[in-house]
Amino acid sequence: MAEFMTGLKRSCYCGELRSGDIGKEVVVCGWVQRQRDLGQLIFIDLRDRTGIVQLAFDDTTDQTVFDKAFTVRSEYVLCARGVVRERSAKSNKIPTGDIEIEVKELRILSESETTPFEIIDNCPTAELTRLKYRYLDLRRPELQNNIIFRHKVAKVTRDYFDENGFIELETPMLIKSTPEGARDFLVPSRIHKGSFYALPQSPQMYKQLCMVAGFDRYMQIARCFRDEDLRADRQPEFTQIDLEMSFVDMEDVLQIGEGYIKRVFKDVMDIDIPTPFPRYTYNEVMERFGSDKPDTRFSMEIFNISEEVKNTEFAVFKNALANGGSVRGITAKNAVKTYTRKEIDKLTEFVKGIGAKGLAWVRWTDDSISSSFAKFMSEDEMQAILKKAGAEKGDVVLIVADGDDSTVLSTLGAVRTECAKKLHIIKDGYNFLWVVKFPFFEFDKESGEWIAMHHPFTSPTDDCMDKLDGNKGEVYAKAYDMVLNGIELSSGSIRITNPDLQKKMFEMLGLSDEEAYEKFGFLMDAFKFGAPPHGGMGIGLDRLVMQMLKAPTLRDVVLFPKVQNASEPMTNAPAGVDQQQLTDLGIAVIPEKE
């Protein structure tokens, strides 16, 4: 039967006790990691969020207390009063391994059934089971430490921005649905039947309105929502360190961002991050790494052999060049043993799965040079390719050709990362960089239209103002992304505040005055009343913590995450609701066809 703590009050945490506490009477509370019954000796490992301490019961223990200790099982909740003493069999596996508590009083506060899995780090139980019992999974020290680490990051975040003059403001959760690049989560209104709120994908327009309101420097640890497919570094709800600044240019925003990263790594991990971060233009990272969020912990940069093969009869290369595309590749150093013909076939299937037509290759073994296209090449052409590739004996050259340059680059970017993982050449560390000068527009192949790469309030660069009536592909934006080890941590821009320029950009995006006003009228109206120049960014808190801890997925740093199909196994959300709730909202559900 459960007991009460009346008369006892916890005096310290389990993991805090050390040799300097020997002789002290303490009261500890926690969960039983395990109980060991050795006949005349019982040991209980008691666990709380700070660690484990050993409770000891022997022939000097009151018999009632000893008998109670005998009944204790894993995950019981206990309160124990006793004296700290030196441990006879010391352990270097836990920080409290030099001491134990000689228990004088023991209370069982709560009993526990046998848990579906053992509460240990590196638990072998399937993740889906652990997520179903997430409250038990969160008892594991590994996850508890991750969540506590996240708390420390959030604490430093608030301190840093407060010290730099930012005001923490809270923007609404129920907002108007506006196009921001991903699908909104919609919330039906009971009062205004047939109308919907949206959950914010980001506080973008509200933080801009805060600048119009004169708050000058805004920050918020903001909850954001996007109805999009999940992956290792994406959840449908996430947390963003959001900021906006008035009377600034891009340099000011980047300096604040770098200063924050330097501060949080130093305060939380005692790691010095060098600043300023390297900067690359969008075109440069795409040409060199095939990604706008490149991982620079390894080299393997893309090279262009279009000139070297311009006279080839090899149809794959010839057709790609004839259609205005290119032939490019990467060189996997010392990879010939890893990338056998069989492994290259697997890699070929991989590139086909991401939109490329295939993969050409050259293997330079100790004995010879073999290639998937050698019979179409002269000796001089093959040597020119190897020279451009910087290839040597033991290397594998991987080549992609396509009439669409973006397909070539993005495919090689993915192959580059895939090869680096397989070859184990990704160095340890934290490689930050900025990507700047993004195109303002990107062509959407599905709709056949030009859309804003960031959002329509991003300012074009000064040198593009006279190109707004020309080729949309030549217009660049005052936009910037912070990248860490191949993950986009932050995205931001300097905003448009000139109503005439904003109208022009809406026109270029194909929005009529009426459409633009319907979607963004409240912001356009606000800009008529004296809008300061401003810019900002949003830093993904979940992703930052995930990268700092080198955790494999966001699920390791979020309390109650969703799984791949966006459901939550513990509560079975999302779930149906009763008919009365739907009637109150004026909603009819159309049954899904089998």
Image (cartoon, helix red, strand yellow):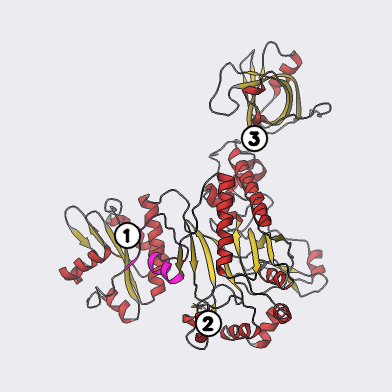
Q: Position of residue 328 (x, y in %)?
A: 32, 69
Q: Label 1, on which residue?
A: 345
Q: Quadrant of the C terminus?
A: bottom right
> Residue 578, relative to residue 321: is it above or below?
above
Q: Name the residue at 64% across, 15% down.
A: 41
Q: Which residue is mark 3?
A: 50
Q: Residue 492 location in percent, x, y? A: 58, 67
Tag 3 near tag 2, CB within 8 Å: no
* Between 156 and 136, the one nearer to me in the picture: 156
The mark that comes first in sequence, 2 or 1, is 1
- Please give left or right for residue 3 compared with residue 69 in the image: right
Q: Residue at x 81, y 74 (%)?
A: 192
Q: Which residue is mark 2?
A: 449
- Cα–Cα gap, marks 3 and 2: 55 Å
For the record, the magenta segment spans 282-303
> In the image, residue 110 lies at what x, y percent?
75, 32
Quick one: quadrant of the N terminus?
Answer: top right
Circle 1 residues within 10 Å: few <14, some 14–19, many ≥20:
few
